[in-house]
Each structure stands twice: as C-alpha cells, then as structure tokens.
C-alpha cells in the first residue's frame, strides 16, 4: 500500500499550526512549495513548544551564569559544579496538554522525557520531583485527572528507579480545563564525563537507539502548542505511551556506551522526535544530516516518512558515533536487548536530507530550520495593581488552622507522595512532605537538596513580586535544610501569549524571577516554557514553577531533626501580618483581594545566610510560606509528634504570609546563642512559642495534635481515594 | 564471605543491596541475568528489588525463567542462603523457592512508606540479630505486596516458625499480616519491606542493619 500524500492547502497548513505569514516565510526559505513531509518538519520545528518563538526575547534576559555553572540553557539540561569533579544535571519540563488528554500516559511520559534529558548528558538520575496543578476538587474531571496523573508519575518513576523526593499539588478553578504537570529530574555526572548534542565530523554514522518507532505522538508538539476546545478528545492519539522498563535499559545502555568513548554527540528524541533531535545535532555542529528512513526500526507497518519524522514514540535516542567503535557500541545495546541501527550520516552541506526507499522526502537547509524559526516581540500590558485588601475579620487560631488542614490545598500530601518511591537508590536522607527533599551524593560526604515552588495566586496579583517570591521560597526551602542554593530551572506555564495581558504576566514574572535569581545567586540553567494553557479562551493562573538545587557540603550538617518536648519556637525574619492573597483569605473567606507579599531579596539572603552560618545551633527548621506562622508551626509539631503552644493570637501574625521568614525549634541554650548572633547580624529573631504536651494551643483554643493530623491526612484520600 | 546480587535488566535496588552487604563485610559480585553460573564460593545470593523485566506480566514471572534463576535454584537446593527483597521476594515465589504469591495491594495503589514490622522468629541467620516480638520500622515500596497462600500453606508456615516478619499495621492486605517468610531449611528469606533502605544512619533509620550484620557474623562462622 502506498499512501498518496495530501496536497498543500491553506487548511492543511493551518492544521499544522502554521500561521499564513509563517508559511510565507517557508516559501521564501526554500523557494518552492514544501512537500507534505517538509511541511510536517517545519511545523514541528516552529511550534511554540520547540521554538520558544513568543518567549525567547524575554528568556534571554534571565541570569544564566555563575562560577558554579558548567552549562546553562540550550542543552538537554543545565549542569552545575558540586566540587570534587562532580556535577548535578537538572531540568524541569511540562507535560500539561498530554496529561489533560490522557492523564496516566501523559504524566508518565513527562517523567520519561525529563529523565532522558538528564541521562542523555551522561548523568545518572538521582532525584525527581513533580509540580501538579489541577482544577477545583468538585469539578467532574478532577478526580480522574489526579488519580491518573499521580499513578502515571509513580508508574514511570518507580519502575525506572529514581527517587521522587518533592513536588507540589494545588487546586484552583483556573486549572479546570487545563491541568499542569511539571516534571523535574536531576542526575549526577562526572565533570569529565558530560556529553553534548553538537555533532562533529563529516561522514560520521548517525545511530538510532532504544525503542522502535510507532505512530504514537505524531504531531504531539504541535498539539501541545495549541489552545484546547471541545474537540480535545479527538487528540488522544497524539499522546505517547511510556515504557519505563525500556527507559531504564536505555539509560543503563547509554551510560555504559558513554564509558566506551564511542559517543561523539547524543540527543534524546523528545518533542518532535527524529526531526528535532537530528536538526539539533546538525545545527549545533554546523553540519548537515542525511537520514535513510527505511533503516529506522519501526513498530508498525507501512509507516510513512511524515509519520517517522514526527513520531513521538518514547525511549529513543539519536547519537553520532565514532565509526571505529561501532561493534563495541552495538554489543552494549545487544546486551540490553535494545534496537541499534545506523540510520544516516553527517554531511558537509547545510542540508536536512530525508530519504525513504531511495525517494527524497525532504531536502531542507538544516541551519535555517533551527535558526530562522520565527521570533515574536508580542505586545504586552503591565498587570494592573491589585485591588487593596479589604478588612479581614479576626478568626480563632485553631479554627483557621483546622480550615487550612481540611482544605485540599494545605492538607497533608502523603496520599500523593506515598504512591512514589522516594527511597530507591538508598541515599534518601529526607522524604517528601517536609520542605526540601535531600539525597546523599552516593559514596561521598555531600548531599543535594531539591525543591519546587511557586505561588500562582501571588503571580496573578502581581507577576513581578510573584516571580520573585517563587525563587525566594525555593531559596528558603533549600536554606531551611542547611543547603547552599546553587542554581534554578524554570518551568513557565502561562495562557495565550497572543493576548497582551497574558504576555504582560509572562514579562512581569520573568523580570521578577531574573531579579531574584541574580540577588540570591541561583542562576537559571535550564527550563521550559508552556504557553497556550487555556481552554475555551480562559487562561490558567500564571504558574512559573521554580525547581532549585542546593548543596550540603557535609551531609552531617543537614538540618533534618524534628521538634521535641521542651524546645522553644523561634521566628526569624520580620512579620507585618500581610494577609493579601493569603491561603487563609482564599480558603476561609473565599477571597482573592489584596496584593502579593513584597519580597525583600536582601533580607531573604541575610536570613538564609544566617541559617547556614548557625547550623551548629539550628537542628530543626522550616520556612514560613502558605498559611503563615500557624501552619508552619503545626508542621514542625506534626513532624516531631509533639504539641506546640503559640504566643501570638492575632490573625495577621498567625496567618500572614510575609516573606523571608523561618521557624526554628531548639533548646533554651541554643536559643540564647542564636539571639546573640541574630542581634549581631541585625536580624529579627523572636520567641513565638514552645513545644510541649500533645495539643496545639493558640490563645484560649486548643486541639489535640492527633486530631489535626487525622483531619489533614484524611482530606486527600476522602476526595480521591 | 561472598555475596552475589542478581541483576535483571529492570532491577533498581541491586546497588542498594550490594552496599548493605558490603557494609556488613561481604565481598559482593553483581551477576547478570543472562549468566549461566554463579561466581565460585558464593555464600548468599541476593535477589534485589525493582521491576526485573518491567513486570508488565505477573511480577517476577519472567525473571523466574531467566538463565541465572536456574543457578539460583541449584544454589538454594544445595543449602545455600538466599535473600529476596520486594521484587526479589516475588521472584522467589515465582521460582517456587518460597510458597504463595504476591497479589496487587488491597488498596490497588503503590505504597511507599515506613511501616512497623514484628519480628516473628529469631531462629534464622536473617533474624537472629533481633528479639522475638521486637517491633522494627522498615520502608516498603511496592504495588504487589499482598501475600497470598492457601490456608494449609499458611498453617504450615506458621506451625513451622517460617513467618519471619509480620506487619504491625497491615498496609497491603497480606494474609495473616505476613511480610516475610522463610524456606523450610530457614536459609531462604523473602520479604516485601526493604531492610537495605534502613541500614545506614544517613537514611535516618538503621532498623534493617541488624539483618545484614547478623548475616555477616553467621556466614563468617560458616565459611571460616
């Protein structure tokens, strides 16, 4: 059976997500009408997901350098020096649209994609996180999405064998038609064993590795760059199917192959599969690529050139190999029972030449595919100042705490993270649920801390402060375990950038993130932009997720103890009782007024430095974020299984969300030493309570800790179990 | 004193188990699933956790038919020691070295959590470092850990003192709260919980250490 290739019509062009002016540009570049396969290739390279055409202008403004940075954005993942010839390699990436269409596979392949990005560079994955945003719990789709996504994340990561050590889970009506699944992975590499994507040398074999190519995911990247409407169910075939067992073998085989010295360059096949990976390797190496598609291992019969070039089948890699090492390389892949096929070669001319059974299916100027992708300076308007905060009534502290603990947003996350293996590899020092996750660097004294943070309601009210706050909270979570923040990955989820107000959110958030990562010395080393997160014209909350990594030089200094009977509770940082856009306001009063809290970056840095400098006295610590002092104090009490008595009783002090604050639990002697040091550093440090008994006590009210814990732990299972 | 840890293509706790054996003084060899022989002089074979062949079929079913599992059976039949953890326990039931089967968790969800275990017998090289009835905290991480056997088998296991560990708070629906069982000669232990994840102070829990150190002491005497 031979397939008649469709004629190039305006409808076909539009169906490929290409705007008329973009098509004009294609005609200009190649000087003729493209073939069907060529149209598919342009569509894959020029969609928002692969080209960053709306965001590039602003991404360039982000600080990406520092002495610790080995490789910033532009490769598969960012690379940061952690000393002793070792590096941490990490990135966060979204899989929002696929996860909404097919939650299990969408989330699973999101995890698979990010793991591949990491081991493609020569790093063995050692930690994963997931930041998940869903619609309101009463929405009919939410339960199915939550269950599917959580199972998909677990199903893939657990089998692959990477510990999931952190993440986020939030619910808001703004995500009803467009959930967010942001997957983070970090790996460990030797600084002299890092691999990049740039091909080098003419006539070098281009090798296909891993799973076979099927029709799954054809056009996935283009789908991911479109807004959703009622026809979304029809897009199900564009979601890929994951096979973590194959990914595990691909990782082992890839790392083993790298040891042999056979690899010149390597690129995983992610979005837009063979097209994107081949163009990337050629473009970075200033070479052309010729592919002979009949050599591509296929899972299905009669696959066309178009389908092979756009397939997003998972667990595949493309490599440029040293020809003399071919036999050695093939032996490694035979050992792991994976496909290994030479499918083409590097060529000196600037061509992307696609042959299929001796017929030319595409012949395009390769460098132009990558470099001439459209770039837009989208119009944007500044987000108007938030409406001022109306009066907030006083609420009983225990009532407020109970309301938060019973809410889907601030209840215990055990139901989610217990579905993820958080301890495989046996180096986990701190499992999820208590701030940053900590992984020991295997065989060394070092440890790495991981966190993922953003507060979308702040970003909505004030994109600039909200962007700063996402970074600041990540900084605090790392500092609270005694880690020195090293660098950041950003996963920027926004609505339709063609709307000036959405673009304004994006620009504001980028400016805030940029200012914060500069001030806190956490350069952005990798990231991903997900735009068009809208359904029927309604955008999500702006959600620039920040993933961050910190280093603990001596794992023994990690702050991981829990509060005990007799400890005093200290609050570091200034508290003015900022209730605008707070968790309390949203959950108890169902209000979203007021501005986001201001982030004083100098104060953030001073407080974080104080924690690190005083690790001899600080053994129990947490940052204060959503839910303020009251929720943070409860979390310390819960982790230590000991009651707490809080001194403040007024609502702004208990539930205000002023930034730059930490809670510390310690004995009286340690508290005295800390007070002296805080005085010297000119930092506010005050006693706000003590740990005693088995109740949480605020003013005249109290509740047994065990009751609060039961309430908190029951919330998610009752909704989704 | 030598240990061998089997490596299936989807094993992911193989290194973890090797590290725990090494910390207890064993020399450890990693043995590939396609191999047809165990290294010379191996005292104990570890069958690690993970997803041996992806576990898309019954967990451990394909692994049980791999070349190296023939050697594993021969080793056990000759009175050799075997420790199977998690997927390793599943493999041991699939090979027939231990009775029963591991079904999907009663709650149908994967569970990763540290759970209380009760030490039911100290009459084995694996458990002699504990006190009978002692409660220890060991992490579990599985989707299919729901131990099942017919009543006669369960009665026999209990009657012969072959239940090594029971759950203090049954997380997965296992019959009679069984978390780990021994072979008739007491030299093969299969258990769903992961003692190798609680064998080092950095992991925040060392309740599993006593198993590996007791094994080390016991086998040191055997091989000395």
Image (cartoon, coloured by chain):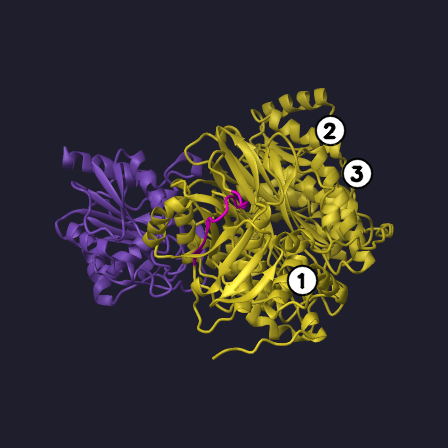
Chain colours: A yellow, B purple
Q: Which residue is mark 1?
A: A225
The location of residue A148, given as percent across then percent down, is 54, 65
Chain of the residue on which disc 2 is drawn: A
Q: Position of A167 compared to B181: left or right? A: right
Q: Secondary structure at mark 2?
A: loop
Q: Position of A145 compared to B18: left or right? A: right
Chain of the residue on which disc 1 is drawn: A
The location of residue B79, given as percent across then percent down, is 14, 48
Q: Is disc 3 in the same subunit as disc 1? A: yes
Q: Which residue is mark 3?
A: A576
- Asked whether B191 or A420 is in front, the reply is A420
Q: Which residue is mark 2?
A: A684
Chain of the residue on which disc 3 is drawn: A
Whole-number angstrom distance, CA of label 3 to CA of label 1: 42 Å
Q: Which residues are magenta?
A: A196-210
Whether A272 is among the magenta residues is: no
């Amino acid at each position: 059976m031979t397939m008649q290739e469709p004629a190039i019509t305006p409808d076909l062009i539009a169906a490929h997500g290409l705007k008329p002016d973009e098509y004009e540009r294609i005609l200009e570049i190649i000087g003729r009408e493209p073939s069907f396969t060529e149209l598919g290739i342009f569509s894959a390279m020029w969609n928002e997901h692969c080209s960053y055409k709306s965001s590039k202008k602003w991404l360039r403004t982000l600080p990406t350098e520092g002495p610790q940075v080995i490789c910033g954005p532009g490769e598969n993942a960012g690379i940061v020096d952690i000393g002793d010839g070792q590096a941490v390699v990490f990135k966060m990436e979204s899989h929002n649209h696929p996860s909404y269409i097919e939650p299990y596979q969408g989330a699973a392949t999101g995890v698979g994609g990010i793991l591949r990005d990491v081991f493609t560079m020569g790093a063995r994955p050692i930690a994963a996180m997931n930041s998940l945003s869903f619609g309101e719990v009463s929405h009919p789709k939410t339960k199915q999405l939550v269950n599917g996504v959580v199972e998909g994340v677990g199903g893939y990561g657990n089998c692959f064998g990477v510990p999931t050590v952190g993440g986020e889970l939030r619910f808001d009506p703004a995500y009803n038609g467009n959930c967010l699944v942001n997957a983070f992975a970090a790996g460990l590499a030797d600084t002299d064993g890092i691999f990049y994507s740039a091909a080098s040398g003419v006539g070098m074999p281009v090798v296909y590795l891993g799973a076979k190519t099927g029709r799954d995911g054809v056009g996935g990247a283009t789908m991911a760059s479109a807004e959703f409407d009622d026809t979304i169910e029809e897009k199900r075939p564009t979601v890929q199917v994951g096979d973590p067992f194959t990914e595990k073998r691909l990782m082992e085989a890839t790392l083993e192959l790298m040891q042999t010295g056979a690899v010149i360059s390597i690129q995983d096949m992610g979005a837009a599969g063979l097209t994107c990976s081949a163009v990337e390797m050629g473009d970075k190496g200033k070479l052309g690529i010729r592919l002979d598609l009949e050599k591509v291992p296929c899972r299905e019969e009669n696959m066309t050139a178009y389908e092979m070039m756009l397939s997003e089948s998972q667990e595949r890699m493309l490599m440029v190999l040293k020809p003399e090492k071919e036999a050695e390389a093939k032996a490694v892949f035979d050992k792991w029972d994976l496909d290994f096929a030479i499918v083409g070669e590097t060529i000196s001319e600037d061509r992307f030449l696609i042959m299929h059974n001796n017929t030319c299916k595409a012949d395009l100027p390769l460098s132009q595919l990558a470099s001439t992708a459209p770039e837009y300076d989208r119009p944007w308007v500044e987000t108007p100042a938030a409406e001022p905060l109306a009066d907030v009534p006083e609420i009983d502290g225990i009532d407020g705490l109970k309301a938060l603990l019973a809410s889907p947003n601030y209840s215990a996350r055990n139901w989610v993270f217990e579905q993820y293996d958080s301890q495989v590899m046996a180096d986990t020092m701190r499992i999820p649920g208590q701030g940053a996750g900590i992984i020991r660097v295997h065989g060394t004294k070092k440890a790495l801390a991981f966190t993922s943070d953003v507060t979308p309601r702040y970003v909505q009210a004030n994109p600039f402060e909200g962007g700063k706050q996402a970074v600041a909270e990540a900084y605090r979570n790392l500092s609270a375990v005694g880690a020195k923040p090293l660098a950041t990955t950003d996963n920027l989820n926004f609505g339709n950038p063609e709307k000036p107000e959405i673009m304004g959110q994006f620009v504001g958030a980028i400016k805030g993130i940029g200012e914060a990562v500069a001030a806190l010395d956490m350069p952005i080393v990798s990231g991903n932009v997900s735009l068009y997160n809208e359904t029927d014209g309604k955008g999500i909350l702006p959600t620039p997720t920040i993933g961050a990594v910190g280093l603990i030089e001596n794992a023994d200094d990690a702050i991981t103890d829990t509060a005990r009977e007799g400890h005093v509770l200290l609050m570091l940082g200034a508290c003015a009782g900022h209730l605008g856009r707070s968790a309390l306001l949203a959950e108890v009063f169902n209000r979203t007024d007021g501005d986001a809290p201001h982030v004083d970056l100098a104060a953030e840095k001073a407080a974080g430095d104080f924690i690190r400098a005083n690790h001899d006295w600080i053994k129990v610590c947490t940052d204060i974020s959503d839910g303020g002092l009251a929720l943070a104090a409860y979390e310390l009490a819960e982790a230590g299984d000991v009651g707490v008595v809080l001194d403040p009783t007024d609502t702004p002090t208990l539930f205000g969300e002023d930034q730059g604050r930490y809670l510390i639990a310690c004995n009286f002697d340690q508290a005295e030493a800390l007070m002296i040091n805080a005085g010297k550093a000119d930092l506010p440090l005050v006693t706000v309570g003590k740990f005693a008994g088995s109740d949480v006590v605020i003013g005249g009210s109290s509740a047994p800790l065990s009751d609060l814990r039961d309430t908190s732990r029951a919330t998610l299972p009752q909704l989704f179990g | 004193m030598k240990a061998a840890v089997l490596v299936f293509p989807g094993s992911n706790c193989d290194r973890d188990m090797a590290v725990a054996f090494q910390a207890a003084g064993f020399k450890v060899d990693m043995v590939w699933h396609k191999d047809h022989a165990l290294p010379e002089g191996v005292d104990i074979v570890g069958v690690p956790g993970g997803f041996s062949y992806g576990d898309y079929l019954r967990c451990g079913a394909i692994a049980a038919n791999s070349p190296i599992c023939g050697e594993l059976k021969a080793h056990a039949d000759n009175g050799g020691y075997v420790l199977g953890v998690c997927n390793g326990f599943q493999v041991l039931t699939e090979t027939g070295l231990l009775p029963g089967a591991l079904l999907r968790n009663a709650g149908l969800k994967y569970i990763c959590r540290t759970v209380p275990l009760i030490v039911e017998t100290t009459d084995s090289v694996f458990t002699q470092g504990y006190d009978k009835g002692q409660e220890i905290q060991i992490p579990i991480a599985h989707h299919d850990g729901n131990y099942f056997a017919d009543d006669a088998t369960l009665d026999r296991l209990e009657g012969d003192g072959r239940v090594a560990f029971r759950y203090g708070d049954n997380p997965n629906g296992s019959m009679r709260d069984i978390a780990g069982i021994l072979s008739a000669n007491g030299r093969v232990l299969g258990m769903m919980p992961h003692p190798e994840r609680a064998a080092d102070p950095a992991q925040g829990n060392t309740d599993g250490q006593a198993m590996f150190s007791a094994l080390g002491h016991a086998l040191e005497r055997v091989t000395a």
